[in-house]
Amino acid sequence: MKRSAAPSAPRDGATAPTTADLRREQLLDAAFALVAERGLEGLRTRDVAARAGVNVATLHYYFASKEDLIVGLVDLVRAKFTARPPIPAGAKPRQELSIRAHLDAAWWVFTSDPRLDSVLLELVSRSSRDPVAREAFRTLHDDWNRIVADELRAAASAGTIRSDLDPIAGARVVTSYIIGARLQLGVNPMAFVPSDVDDELERLLRPAGERQARKGGGAPTARIRTSKSR
């Protein structure tokens, strides 16, 4: 049976999700909630089916095995990574060509669903010993890095970041930072304030003429906090 990715919200002019898409999404949401509560070792297909309000046969129609369900969870995480904050009614979409816009969106994703930290930790651990999960994560990383590399190219063309930046290597830096930050904060929510590090990363990516080193040891002003003040 083909593995199915998590459905994404339809864009303007796109076809609305089918009943099968919605059922798949319902099952993945149930699995996501159970992994957040019990970890992957406690994930049972019968429990997922019960949480979703269907029988096990229905679950197996969409996901033939637990491994297929885990691949679906990785796809769901990928969909969450690429989500963006909702636009207020009447407001125009902002087309920010900056790495800060991407980082702000990433932190919004994690703060809007605190369970994502726990599920990410579980999936990363699983992928280190499960070739199926590892391949799914490889695809996630490739797709995500491609998106960020495109954003960096656009930002460089617009003059908001260094023109000599290697977008592919730069994308790896950004995505590795986000994943690493979430793993650290998942273990210790008070480890650091992400916006402090964002300020420094943003400064390093600015064109040389606009880059200003902090002098006197002053700390940057935190703008977005994902944990309680220390």
Image (cartoon, rainbow, N blue to C red):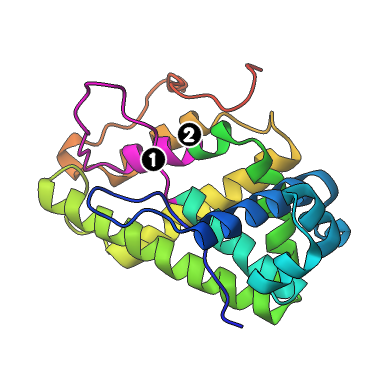
> What secondary structure is the stretch in magenta mostly built from?
loop
Q: Is 174 above or below relative to 228?
A: below
For residue 108, the mark is: 2
Indicate the amino acid at tag 1.
Answer: Arg
Q: Which residues are magenta?
A: 82-108
Q: Nearer the viewer, mark 1 or mark 2?
A: 1
Residue carrying label 1: 84
Question: What residue is at 20 percent from the left and 49 percent from the top?
Answer: 155
Residue 152 in picture, x, y percent from top left: 26, 54
Q: Residues within 10 Å of mark 2 (few under 14, many from 20)?
A: some
Rendered position, 167 above or below 67:
above
The residue lying toward the viewer, choosing from 161 and 58, is 58
Q: Where, by quadrant of the figure, is residue 207 drawn?
A: top left
Q: Earlier in the sequence, mark 1 or mark 2?
A: 1
> Which residue is at 30% across, 61% downward?
149
Under circle 1, the secondary element is: loop
